[in-house]
Image (spheres, rainbow, N blue to C red):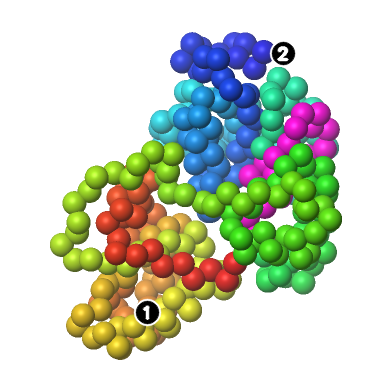
């Protein structure tokens, strides 16, 4: 089956290197959502044809937000619940997987019945090493093991995560694990030329304020820095989906007596985030993993 059948001419990439089917059902989820959107941009920039599995709600949101690449990918709507039996047993029967060369899951859930080479990205094994609930390790270990065993290749985003995967699942990843670090939006090209801000700043990005992301550690470390440097200390700018409730963030900031030094911008556009990355004196990362 030709995956371009029924698509408009604007949706067809001429002479693609590969036809890649990407599971985009976490398209607007925190870090994995950003990773998925950047994967789409990177694959298109490399000349690949991209198919995107997407939920009906996310497709509507993507249209509302006018994602610039939406008209040049083939969308396959599927509303299978995440981590469900329907996802594992039914998704591959409903989506034209066989029309593609490679299937990429940007998370550790890999449906059964995919008869083409598969790539799975495992960002971390936080559900095993730092579980929020007691039953998480029991479920996560089995889902990750299943995905690693059946995947043709496994990607992770840091050497630290690679070490964790090798320690917990050594035989399953020994010959097929690659570390491909995260990058910023538009990372396939040069950073934009931007003017330096009047006041230099540090930047930190949070998709969530869960404990393992290290927000409290960041505030503690930054408070020590401000105490040491005084008036010479640089302000800290915070962005990301983790700050959808600014009052919660400011409550924690106030507890460290940092109210005048920390600025919460919340969720910003990809273009604004890229500019902030380019302007920042340094990007501060405090995640435990």
Magenta stretch in the rendered image: 105-125
Which residue is under mark 1?
A: 222
Asked whether the viewer can see residue 92, the reply is no
Which numbered tag is attached to residue 187?
none
Q: Is residue 112 magenta?
A: yes
Residue beneath the point at 30% across and 83% down: 226
The answer to whether residue 84 is above or below residue 135 is above
Which residue is under mark 2?
A: 1
Q: Is residue 122 magenta?
A: yes
Question: Magenta stretch mostly in which secondary structure?
Answer: loop
Q: Seen from this angle, which residue lies furthest front?
A: 175
Image coordinates of residue 202 in percent, x first then y, are 32, 67
In the figure, residue 255 lies in which quadrant?
bottom left
Q: Residues within 10 Å of mark 2 (few under 14, many from 20)?
A: few
Q: Seen from this angle, which residue lies furthest bottom?
A: 227
Image coordinates of residue 74 in percent, x first then y, are 57, 23
The answer to whether residue 35 is above or below residue 69 is below
The answer to whether residue 191 is above or below residue 201 is above
Q: Nearer the viewer, residue 20 or 268?
A: 20
Image coordinates of residue 288 in percent, x first then y, are 57, 71
Tell me how far mark 1 sits from mark 2, CA to CA. 56 Å
Q: Nearer the viewer, residue 289 or 73?
A: 289
44 with respect to 219 (left or right): right
- Which quarter of the figure is the C terminus placed in? bottom right
In the figure, residue 231 lies in which quadrant?
bottom left
Q: Secondary structure at mark 2?
A: loop
Residue beneath the point at 51% across and 51% down: 182
Q: Residues within 10 Å of mark 1 (few under 14, many from 20)?
A: many
Asked whether the viewer can see residue 18, the reply is yes
Residue beneath the point at 43% across and 49% down: 184
Q: Does label 1 or label 2 sit earlier along the sequence?
A: 2
Image coordinates of residue 101 in percent, x first then y, are 69, 25
């Amino acid at each position: 089956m030709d995956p371009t059948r029924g698509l408009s001419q604007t949706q067809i990439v001429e002479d693609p290197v590969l036809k890649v089917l990407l599971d985009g059902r976490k398209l607007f989820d925190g870090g994995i959502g950003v990773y998925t959107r950047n994967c789409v941009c990177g694959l298109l920039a490399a000349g690949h044809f991209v198919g995107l599995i997407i939920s009906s709600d996310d497709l509507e949101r993507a249209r509302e937000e006018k994602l610039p690449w939406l008209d040049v990918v083939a969308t396959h709507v599927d509303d299978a619940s995440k981590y469900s039996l329907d996802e594992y047993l039914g998704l591959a029967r409903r989506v034209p997987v066989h029309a593609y060369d490679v299937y990429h899951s940007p998370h550790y859930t890999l449906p059964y019945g995919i008869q083409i080479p598969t790539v799975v990205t495992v960002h971390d094994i936080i559900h095993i090493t730092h579980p929020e609930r007691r039953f998480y390790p029991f479920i996560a270990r089995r889902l990750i093991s299943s995905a690693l065993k059946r995947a043709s290749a496994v990607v992770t985003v840091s050497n630290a995560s690679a070490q964790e995967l090798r320690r917990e699942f050594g035989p399953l990843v020994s010959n097929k694990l690659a570390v491909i670090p995260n990058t910023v939006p538009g990372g396939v090209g040069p950073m934009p030329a931007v003017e330096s801000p009047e006041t230099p700043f540090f930047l930190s990005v949070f998709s969530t304020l869960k404990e393992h992301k290290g927000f409290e550690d960041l505030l503690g470390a930054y408070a020590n820095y401000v105490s040491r440097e005084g008036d010479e200390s640089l302000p800290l700018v915070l962005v990301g989906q983790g700050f959808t409730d600014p009052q919660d963030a400011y409550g924690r900031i106030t507890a460290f007596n940092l109210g005048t030094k920390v600025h919460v911008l919340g969720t910003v556009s990809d273009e604004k985030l890229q500019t902030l990355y380019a302007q920042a004196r340094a990007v501060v990362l405090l995640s435990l993993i």
